[in-house]
Amino acid sequence: SRGRHMRLLGAGPPGWRPDAVGRPSASGSALVARLVADVKAVVSSGKSEAGMIADFAKILDRHADLPTIARYCLGPDGRSASVAQMAAYTPAFANYIAAKYGRRFRGFVDGEITVQGAKPIKSWIEVETSVLLRGRSPLQMDWHVSDRSGRHAFFNFIIEGVNMLLTERAEVGAMLDRQRGDLDKLIAEMRAA
């Protein structure tokens, strides 16, 4: 279960670890606030799409628990992957995610993302944000943050009820099916994203 993979962060005993100011959710909120500021800086930079995607890759590296996200999205096929394949898959997956979501976040150029609050949920912190895009009603976007990786990092987000982890697990599974289960071909496809 996801609970096995995500260490308890600030939700109370057992394993409860409040942040430096004693509020369990403040670290999760601070992480998302930094992430939002970084995304806003990239989309406002005026860089080319390729430049923005490279910057999004750096943002993911700083703020996401990419090994956990990549492993989850690979699903059961990850259990049969060799150490070398997993070592190649994780950065290829990061490239794929940076390209896919980097292109989508370009639409946030005139938008605002505001942290609304945070609360412990199961074994992580859920940070609620509101996304306001020009000409649209506000969107709800929730970030799941944990310190399982040894640092506070997000491992999922849900925008208007669409769960990134579940969506990408289905997408990666479909990509692997198109490659007839060949993980090396999937890695090559993700590198080319």
Image: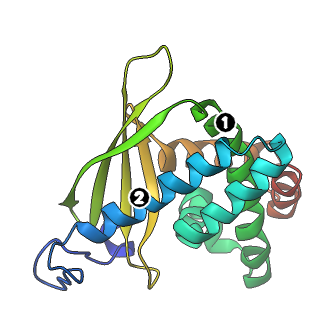
Quadrant including the N terminus: bottom left
62 vs 84, left or right, is: left
CB contact under 8 Å: marks 2 and 1: no
Q: Report the front residue among 53 and 73.
A: 53
Q: Position of residue 95 (x, y in %)?
A: 76, 58
Q: Report the front residue among 87 and 55.
A: 55
> Mark 2 packing: few (<14 Cα in 10 Å), some, or many (20+)?
many
Amino acid under disc 2: Val
- Residue 10: image quadrant is bottom left
Q: Which residue is mark 2?
A: 32
Which residue sits at x=79%, y=82%?
84
Judged from this view, the residue extending furthest toward the left is: 13
179 vs 69, left or right, is: right
Q: Which mark is residue 1?
A: none
Q: Report the front residue among 27 and 13.
A: 27
Q: Which residue is mark 1?
A: 106
- Secondary element under disc 1, as helix, strand or loop, is helix
> Mark 1 packing: few (<14 Cα in 10 Å), some, or many (20+)?
some
Q: Position of residue 179 (x, y in %)?
A: 83, 48
Q: Is residue 135 above or below residue 119?
A: above
Residue 186 visible in this rendered orientation of the protein? yes
Q: Is residue 119 above or below residue 65?
A: above
- Secondary element under disc 2, as helix, strand or loop, is helix
Distance from Cα at disc 2 to Cα at disc 1: 18 Å
Q: Position of residue 75 (x, y in %)?
A: 57, 59
Amino acid under disc 1: Arg
13 vs 10, left or right, is: left
